[in-house]
Amino acid sequence: MGAIRTRDAPALSIAICLVLALALIASARADAASAAQPARGEQTFTPVIQDVVSTPRWFRGIDGLVHVQYDLRLINGFPVNATIQSIEVRRRGGGVLAELTGDALRDATSPVGSPSINETTLPPSSAAFAFMDLTVADPGRLPKRIVHTITVEIEPGLPVPSASVSTGARARVHQGPPVRIAPPLAGALWTTVVGAHRRSMQPVNGRFVNGQRFAIDWNRLDERYRPAFGDPATFASNPSYGAPLLAVANGRVVEAVDGIPDQAPDRFEPVGAEIADGNVVILRLAPNVFAGYAHLVPGSVRVEHGDRVRTGDVLGELGNSGNSNGPHLHFQLMNEPSLLASTGLPLEFRKFRLAGVIPSMDAFGEAFATQTPVPFVTGGAGVYRNRTPVGIDILDLP
């Protein structure tokens, strides 16, 4: 290959170069599995390139487990389909932490830009994310470093083995604790929607970021456990609308936006990124730690840039402004003062009572549509301290 010089060699098509290179490598290798650990100086194709997009971070869930969450990027560098068969996660130099196969792997994997689609087959020259959620029993068992081994099936048509095993995507797990805060609301029967934000990877300012990785959407139920009732064309039908939003810790206001109109409660209109947050308040809680509140009622924002706030101070009211198809509070912690151009940070609430768990997002949506009580189970109900919701939970807040 050293005899080919870019300046004066004849132009070759990409397809011809690829076939020649594949033939050379295939003749030197007959065993795909050994590609996981190539010998020094050996050249081995890794059809799917893998890397960890941002630092894995952890929190302690209501379910009693410690969750380590991050996003694994998978790029198919071949001109044929490549199907991910398994992803194994190991401690660096240690034992296996998790292995994703079958339905679990499919449920975790989505094409870039299509988070609602679950798919493990990467078309030619395409990319996907595997949204990873590792669990360990307690913080003392957190891995310090992790490494990934992927098994890939290659579509016929190239002179290479039909399967490839490669190890990479080494990453250091953040060891610091989650940010401990008070809840952003008060009172009984608040529901949390957590999982919908895990896949909110966005291409922003030249890189992929997920400021919403640990975000929570909050909606309130009435005393009959209904998320909505009455005329859907009025905000009076929603028990969440107008609820006071509270500072989760002492801090300083770094952004306060007001004047963006609410969406009509029964007619959602798409909006651009510039007003997607609607009326918003962002607090600086500590260096590189910011709290964001989105979709506030227009005219309700009580703070201005530079104001100092204390835990429990009222910042505004829960509304439906911006990219919101129903009154709710979108709340998140992040490392920069932007809900979009940032990396999400895990959180834990000092104290709350778990009243029940709604079994699925479909069940929650059906209760909204029919204005009927949400179904829920009460297993695990009780008071929790320094924990994080992990599903569609019903919480009573101090």
Image: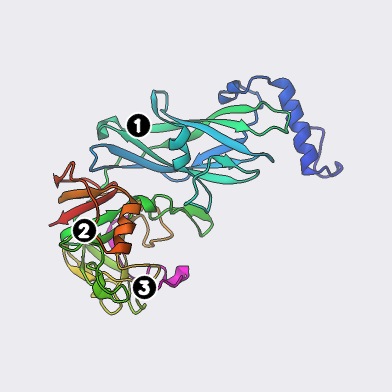
Q: In the drawing, does residue 376 fall left or right of residue 124?
A: left
Which amino acid lies under the numbered mark 2 shown in the image of this protein?
Answer: Trp
- Where 311 falls versus 360 (above or below)? below
Point out the frontmost of discs 2 and 1. 2
Residue 115: where, in percent of width, then height?
A: 48, 51
Q: CB of mark 2 within 8 Å of CB of mark 1?
A: no
Q: Is residue 252 above or below residue 236?
A: above
Q: Residue at x 74, y 22 (%)?
A: 27
Question: Mark 3 is on which residue type?
Answer: Asp
Residue 7 is situated, as x and y percent measured from the top left of the image, at 82, 45
Q: CA distance from mark 2 to mark 1?
A: 34 Å
Which residue is label 3 attached to?
266
Residue 175 lies left or right of residue 72; in this view the side is left
Q: In terms of secondary structure, where does tag 2 sit?
A: strand
| Residue 342 vs residue 26, the one in the foreground | 26
| Residue 281: image tag | none
Magenta extent: 265-293
* Disc 1 residue type (three-letter): Pro
Q: Is residue 219 shown above or below 317? A: above
Which of the marked residues, 2 or 1, is nearer the chain's N terminus?
1
Task: Estimate the x, y position of residue 357 in percent, counting from the top left.
Answer: 23, 48
List x then y, in percent, for residue 398: 12, 57
Determine the residue positioned at 65% across, 31% down. Answer: 45
Nearer the camera: disc 1 or disc 3? 3
Which residue is pictured at 39% across the width and 23% down the height?
94
Residue linked to disc 1:
143
Which quarter of the figure has residue 4?
top right
* Closer-to-camera residue (378/85): 378
Q: Secondary structure at mark 3?
A: loop
Scheme by which the image is coloured: rainbow
Q: What residue is disc 2 on?
A: 190
